[in-house]
Amino acid sequence: MESNATDHFPLAIGKFIHHCGGLELFVNNAIRSFGEDDVLSAAAIKAPLYRRIHTLRNLLHERSDLASEDVVALCDDLEATRKNRNDVVHNPIMTQEVGGWDDAVILCVRYKPDGTIITEELARDDVVRFVNQTSELLQRFAELVPEATKA
């Protein structure tokens, strides 16, 4: 990946989100391709992403020639990416100074059932790691499931 694409924190976030959109398109295309019923496939791609990943996992196990471990690894990585995407897009970016990006972090806040607050910070290096992981995942998905690249 080009270093200038992720040097600036907002650009790294944008590149990661762009990759996530591509992965979601691949998931939808693969469900359409492996689904035997157009009506059910159309309904499946309207479901939340975690359900679509589950549907894709089942379809690939039942209707593709992929090795089971490849299906598991692909779908587990899609699920991990889904969670990372939610952390990035649903939490605020915090900085010490207005307009400053050197110390920026995404502050992930979660609430336990007992009301306890858990926080985690995602720095630029974390988002760059997500960019690299999703870049590899897009390539692997396209190689394993070429049907996913066809609309």
Image: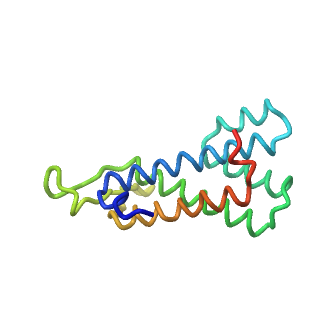
Q: Residue at x 36, y 62 (%)?
A: 118
- Specify whether 112 is left or right of 33: left
Q: Residue at x 46, y 49 (%)?
A: 17
Q: Quadrant of residue 145?
A: bottom right
Image spot of residue 41 (x, y percent): 76, 36
Which part of the image, by quadrant, shows the N terminus?
Answer: bottom left
Q: Residue at x 73, y 32 (%)?
A: 42
- Viewer-side residue, 135 vs 116: 135
Q: Residue furthest left?
A: 97
Task: Check the image and report above or below for 65 versus 40.
Answer: below
- Specify whether 3 is left or right of 46: left
Image spot of residue 56 (x, y percent): 73, 50
- Viewer-side residue, 141 vs 81: 141
Asked if one can make out residue 106 in the rendered structure from this viewpoint, the answer is yes
Q: Residue at x 40, y 53 (%)?
A: 88
Asked if one can make out residue 117 in the rendered structure from this viewpoint, the answer is no
